[in-house]
Image: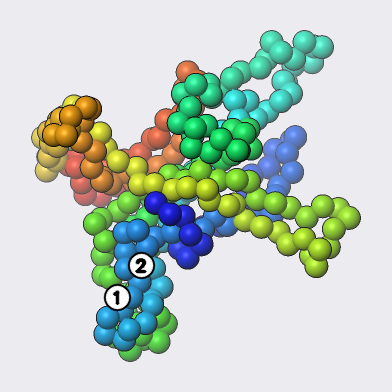
Amino acid sequence: DDASMTGNDIDISSGSSSNMEQSTPVKPCFDTTSWETLLDESTKTNRLPFTDGHNPSIVSLASNPYEQGTTTTNDSSSNQHVRLDPKHISPLTSAFPSYPLNNLFLAVTIFGNGQCKFGLSDQEVIDYNFSVYNDPPDGKRTIIAVMTPPTSLEEDDTEQQQQHRPFQILGQTTLLLERDVKYGTKRQKGKFIEAQSNPQGGGYTRIHQEFDDPRFFFHEGRLWVLYRNGPLFGYQDQ
């Protein structure tokens, strides 16, 4: 999907630790126009996007972003841990050859019922330029984006010389389910999605599914996404 700067934005504030300084909050801006229409046909005006990203997870694509070990010996290499093996994300290297992986970040976030217009009259919805949607188009959607890091002001710079810039999105796409095995459950009110080969040959079909509250984690040199899909697995309340 084309990642223009016309979508929603998300506040990101980094945490702090003994060897890290807290950074200024920054905003990545996602494009929602690939799955929702902003034009209100009744008024012929563009409205605010309905879906709003929340609960983001953002990680560095560096093999080991923590260069120094925590040991007190001179040999800090014994404490080095390669959390992400570059060979497992080679498609990103091919897609963005001019950007070293050590300088890139990967983000994942869910877009769903982000707009709250409960209790507003029809006129108030128009006055505040809210979206005409009442439910997220095609359901909740999980977006993954490749980003460059935010810039910050140098000590000898002023705001007039250099403005603080947010994360810049190089590309974004919807996280899809590959139907290589059965997915879901028959417990309670859950349901199965059957495996399905690609009718055009090669591999399996991929479909849009709800991957709520996504979180990145690292394991054995790979990057994984932890998520939940309550309705498909028989849970209505989470």
Disc 2 residue crowd, few under 14, some 14–19, many 20+, Cα 10 Å: many
| 222 relative to 77 in the view: left or right | left
**Residue 232 point in image, percent of width and height:** 19, 42
| 178 relative to 155 in the view: left or right | left
Q: Is residue 5 above or below residue 203?
A: below
**Residue 28 point in image, percent of width and height:** 54, 55
Give the quarter of the image for residue 47: bottom left
Q: Residue at x 16, y 34 (%)?
A: 200
Circle 1/circle 2 CB separation < 8 Å: yes
Taking the view exactly as shown, the residue that stands out farthest to the bottom is 123
In the picture, the disc for residue 65 is none
Q: CA distance from mark 1 to mark 2?
A: 8 Å
Q: Amino acid at mark 2?
A: Phe
Q: Secondary structure at mark 2?
A: loop
Q: Secondary structure at mark 1?
A: loop
Residue closest to the eye, 41 or 50 = 41
Q: Residue at x 39, y 51 (%)?
A: 1
Kindly tell me whether residue 179 is visible in this rendering: no
**Residue 176 point in image, percent of width and height:** 30, 41
**Residue 32 point in image, percent of width and height:** 39, 60
Mark 1 — residue?
A: 132
Give the quarter of the image for residue 25: bottom right
Q: Is residue 143 above or below residue 163?
A: above
Mark 2 — residue?
A: 50
| 110 relative to 105 in the view: left or right | left
Q: Is residue 72 above or below residue 100?
A: above
Residue closest to the eye, 214 or 93 = 93
Q: Residue at x 35, y 71 (%)?
A: 38
| 124 relative to 197 in the view: left or right | right
* Dot placed on the residue nearer the N-terminal end, 1 or 2: 2
Disc 1 residue crowd, few under 14, some 14–19, many 20+, Cα 10 Å: some
Q: Residue at x 38, y 77 (%)?
A: 46
